[in-house]
């Protein structure tokens, strides 16, 4: 658990893991932004560093001098309270600073930060901010993995890359559905470790009886849907989902390619055959919802998921829920730039629960609320279903 | 209540009200579609008629002959199960059939329908379908009002039109907040009258304490927000809302015009001064949410609204809630085309509760769930706020 | 010839012909703007009337009072020097003023104009302005025909409309190519009647030998191209043309529909079979150029066309030339709003020569330069080809 | 002159110059495509190499083995006859092959090509193809310079880069206008050296008297236009140009920045003050045409330019002409892929004459026809004007 080791060691570990993810990249791979959802790896490296410089070093280390005056402008993201925002779509055309300069920026900031952490006695507020910074960087570690996969997976040469990921274990899940009885339950974070603001406000919810599948939907299950014409029958789809399928010509999960009648998918090992008993991955909410409708099931709400999770095999896929991303009762936005963190995204997105193979060890929790718009699928998203009585 | 008078009388009344709404129009006003959300009044007249022809006359009256073979194609809407869909954006360029022909179509179908209703003894299923048709037509009556307002309100001549609407009464609302104590409550439709499928499945919810404002937000309240720079400060806005404000240059509710320092708004009486103590209207979810954040309050959830509604003055504005439009526990889609009615829209929309001055008498209910995407505001949408303890 | 009868009679004739074109319309047909190129017939009626009010009555008739203060705003077109321009794409959503009001506007302006013409003794400058106004209105007569065809031809009911047009005569053209010898020729307007500013500056050009086809390309010729896969082979197409074909899925001239293996096209008599020996019509420059390349011929330049025209059967189609629309040597823009007439369009357009069945009698001339962007085809555009030695 | 030294030496020189242009780049700079007009430098390096492999080595060297099977797909451009085309906008997201691999590709192909040239006795046809390849690569050398300038000039850090360019000399041009008398002149290429197909077909043209400015328009001249409100007065602009100015908010040449009331522009030496007596650069046809209209002059036609050029100081800017890019009389497209070279672009573009500081030594000619759409300005485009009598 993160909090049992010294802050400076935690910091070192997290920062090193970020760079370990990028180790297999060529310089060119760091630069591009093929779609607006994906950021250049170079930008992730710079942005996470800017966070430490802007929120810790600048306000707390009097003698600190900025590495470069323009980097705040270049590596800021959506935080509207810190200077002028770079138009996001331009990130992928900024060839300078170079990758080497960005690594020097990281080294410079790391040295100052470690020096600070080893000598300062941070207040509880500052320690909380540092925990937030560590978790922020872990979120970008996950995005680095998914963005690198997008960049390489959309290259006609299908390059391989040995990223430090923990791959799936094929644990046999009990075939028995997990029955949860009707009643009042509590959800939301209650401990005293780190959590994001959107998990706070543990509160009661009333749930009806439900029966949750202990195993995630597999590629074999999903192929049944696909081969039954699931992508061509509007009856299974939400109206917006059907428009999305038709506008983009969607006919399979992201990274899937049908070659001579056989299904392959891009992985970090290059193009590989789709393995039937692995959990299906890289599907949108629209696809997850359509699959469930076809199957006669439905997706769980986030409360149903959270109540059942002690009994679940997480399966290393983020799991789409039927819950829109909205504030918990009593949700309050923190003051200042850090307060822009989560609350401003609470519309037009769906909640995902669990964690994926791209999630850093120890980063997720049973109460962790991930969220994406319903058409996104470049994250490692999977499907779990629920059966009503 | 609709069900206490004969079906044929109910039918006659609803059909006549539709035409009464259109009486002040010129022929030209029936034709255009200035934005994709707005349908030409002519299309509403034809589409509601097609519903009766397609779902009642065709399957139930053996001798019935279609008024025109192509009208099913021309007046179908999103029902993907009935023939080929017209691309929606083209509706506003179809000058034929003429308005006169559409009225003849209405007369023809009305005669056959009334003849059928007065002589048949409909099964419960058929009676339910007819109630659905009446409610469907009432929904289009509301859309007729809002679409006509859009068409006339975006004309540089700002024409007047004497639509048969019940205008606001300025009932003084108690200034005391309405306190609702924590506990398990039930929501959803429970009676045996008509309701839409999305209201069914009365179920328990757990609510925390909350304090609801008995009166809607007024123009005076909203002007405070506006004049305090509410539209120019990103802190009050959801991220998507802030993008919407900036992309479209939004700086006031729809239909508002600032002329020589004074605020006016378009109404069916032409351009009129904004009246301070009337409820604010024609605001998007983004604006409602930003206003509440600025005020230090929040929007109610739909469950909070429904539990509190016996004590509320509805105020003749649809009221934005903080709830995404999602299925109730146990929601089931009906079979066939009628089953496409509501469920397919359960993503990317927010729930509104109450009713507006455009809602036909008796059409809404305490459990009625209206829904629109968060950027829409051409309906008569208002704001009610909640204060947490 | 226009100039041999009194100005007031000419005025009356032209104005009446405009209304004669619209006589077969229903009120609804006057209102819409299905694509940006097409203007609502109501707008043409108002705009041509505004021209007389703005440029003749306002400056020359002291006692004249505007029919309506806002009509200048509503019916102005691209003339940037006269007040604020209406955003063009909104024309099709302006249901007011009504068609009836626009006809009253015409009557009002006509009465004042005729009164003025019958009593005034116009200066040569004013007479020239009136001739410009008459020719301006004739240009809109042609656009009225083509825009009405677009509106009705894109309606799923394919309505008929008895417009006062002179239809094709099938004059047998000599099969012999017309040979024009190399040398210096003069082109441009030289007479003392009316012409547009872009025809002025008669000047010498040097032409090589060329052989022009005396007959226009027929539907039968064009079907050969189509059936030989002309639309699917990039070799015949300009790069921009090939992009246009693919982006819009073009596979036949505008208004053509293949039904059960047979080619039909929309005409004012409704959907009719394509007649093999009629001149092909409603093709873009890209299609005309691709056809010629496939045939091993080319399109004539405008100078080649003008030099050869005494020997040509015009064929009642505007004929695409291989000339870009550019100023003649010594071209000068006139002062004031009228000077915005033609010169500002001299880029990104190709010249057409001749006249079409929609061109008012006496409006075109051998030196007349019509022009459209290379992807347009809702005018009655045809093809004539040239063979090099 | 290129043809007086051995083919293999010419080849070596041209290939080395391409790499010399790229020497100041960082790896990151080779990868991106900030707008569709600009190609990644890596792509230029690969594409010019692919040309030699595809058109010389593959058909003429029996033992030749492709460097990489997929490179033909990756580095092809618009040649629709060679395999499947890469969607152009994706070029900027292809991080693989890496820059290093592309340089290895160049070395591999160079070795085989030099080996071939030193041992083969090429037929005249093959020699002509090799000359075409050399000129093709020189065209890409010019694009490399302009594309690198775009990539670096749109980076917020404004990096410097020491490209091997010949900079402007400020030669005093005679202030006297150059008078050319009316008459028949010949234009087009007539020699026996290399020229592009679009220059062929020397032919006669008839020109009126004209007076050409011997010096290019300077920054000082252009600032007069700018400061006189030239960008805000529609009277000076073509209709499409005015739309372009307003849609993109254009108010100065590309790369110009106004800082504290002073004009600066990005150069390869970083941000530098605008020098008054240097020729203005990076203006579109719309701007060149508007400037001339404001000045009471006009742009020359390409024939006027070519006839006058023996007496001109070229000024190292490509010079916009008033001529649309169209075929010369008798223009024929060559057979096969090479025949797609120029003819397919003969619509929607304007001709430029002369050469720029980015043009390789010896690449241009008095008859050389460069061409771009009228809104482009990332090439080194300048302005020369003509006065009519």
Image (cartoon, coloured by chain):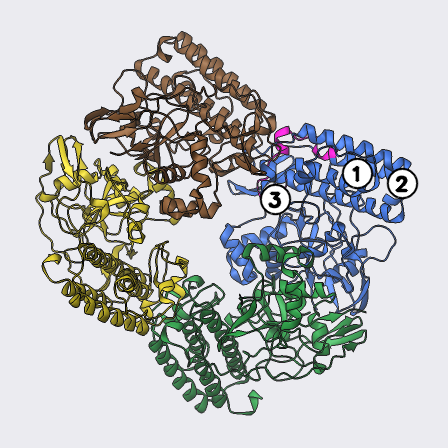
Chain colours: A blue, B green, C yellow, D brown
Between discs 1 and 3, the one toward the N terminus: 1
Q: Quadrant of the C terminus of chain B?
A: bottom right
CA gap between label 2 and label 1 equals 12 Å
Q: Which residue is mark 1?
A: A14
State if disc 1 and disc 2 touch (CB < 8 Å): no
Q: Is residue C355 magenta?
A: no
Host chain of mark 3: A
| Direction from residue D180 to residue B88 in the image, left or right | right
Question: Residue C373 at what x, y percent from top left?
Answer: 32, 46
State if disc 3 and disc 2 touch (CB < 8 Å): no
Q: Which residue is mark 2?
A: A5
Host chain of mark 2: A
Q: Is residue B255 above or below residue A164?
A: below
Between discs 2 and 3, the one toward the N terminus: 2
Q: Is residue B107 visible?
A: yes
Host chain of mark 1: A
Question: Residue A281 at what x, y percent from top left?
Answer: 65, 47
Question: Residue B352 at what x, y percent from top left?
Answer: 63, 71
Circle 3 crowding by C-alpha within 10 Å: few under 14, some 14–19, many from 20: some
| Direction from residue D166 to residue D324 in the image, left or right | left
Q: Is residue A25 magenta?
A: yes
Viewer-closest of A131 and D243: D243
| Direction from residue A317 to residue A35 in the image, left or right | left
**Label 1 vs label 3, nearer the camera:** 3
Circle 1 crowding by C-alpha within 10 Å: few under 14, some 14–19, many from 20: some
Circle 2 crowding by C-alpha within 10 Å: few under 14, some 14–19, many from 20: few
């Amino acid at each position: 658990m993160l909090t049992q080791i010294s802050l400076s060691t935690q910091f070192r570990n997290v920062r090193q893991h970020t760079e370990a993810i990028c180790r297999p990249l060529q310089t060119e791979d760091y630069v591009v932004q093929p779609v607006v959802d994906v950021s250049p790896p170079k930008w992730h490296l710079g942005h996470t560093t800017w966070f430490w410089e802007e929120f810790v070093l600048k306000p707390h280390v009097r003698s600190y001098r900025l590495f470069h005056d323009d980097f705040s402008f270049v590596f800021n993201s959506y935080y509207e309270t810190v200077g002028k925002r770079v138009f996001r779509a331009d990130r992928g055309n900024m060839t300078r600073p170079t990758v080497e300069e960005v690594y020097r920026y990281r080294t410079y900031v790391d040295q100052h930060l470690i020096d600070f952490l080893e000598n300062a006695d941070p207040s509880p507020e500052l320690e909380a901010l540092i925990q937030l910074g560590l978790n922020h960087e872990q979120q970008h570690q996950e995005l680095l993995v998914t963005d690198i996969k997008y960049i390489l997976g959309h290259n006609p040469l299908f390059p391989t890359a040995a990223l430090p990921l923990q791959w799936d274990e094929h644990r046999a899940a009990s075939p028995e559905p997990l029955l949860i009885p009707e009643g009042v339950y509590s959800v939301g974070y209650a401990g005293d470790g780190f959590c994001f603001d959107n998990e706070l406000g543990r509160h009661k919810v009333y749930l009806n009886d439900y029966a949750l599948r202990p195993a995630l939907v597999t590629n074999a299950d999903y192929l049944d849907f696909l081969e039954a014409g699931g992508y061509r029958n509007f009856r299974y789809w939400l109206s917006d989902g059907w428009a999305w399928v038709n506008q983009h010509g969607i006919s399979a999960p992201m990274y899937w390619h049908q070659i001579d009648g056989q299904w392959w998918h891009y992985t970090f090992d290059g193009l590989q055959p789709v393995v039937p008993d692995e959990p299906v991955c890289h599907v949108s909410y629209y696809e997850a919802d359509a699959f469930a409708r076809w199957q006669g099931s439905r997706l769980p709400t986030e409360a149903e998921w959270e109540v059942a999770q002690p009994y679940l095999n997480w399966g290393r896929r983020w799991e789409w829920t039927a819950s829109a991303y909205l504030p918990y009762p009593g949700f309050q936005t923190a003051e200042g730039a850090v307060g822009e963190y989560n609350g401003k995204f609470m519309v037009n997105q769906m909640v995902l629960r669990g964690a994926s193979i791209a999630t850093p060890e120890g980063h997720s929790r049973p109460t962790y609320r991930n969220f994406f718009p319903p058409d996104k699928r470049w994250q490692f998203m999977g499907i779990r279903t629920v059966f009503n009585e």
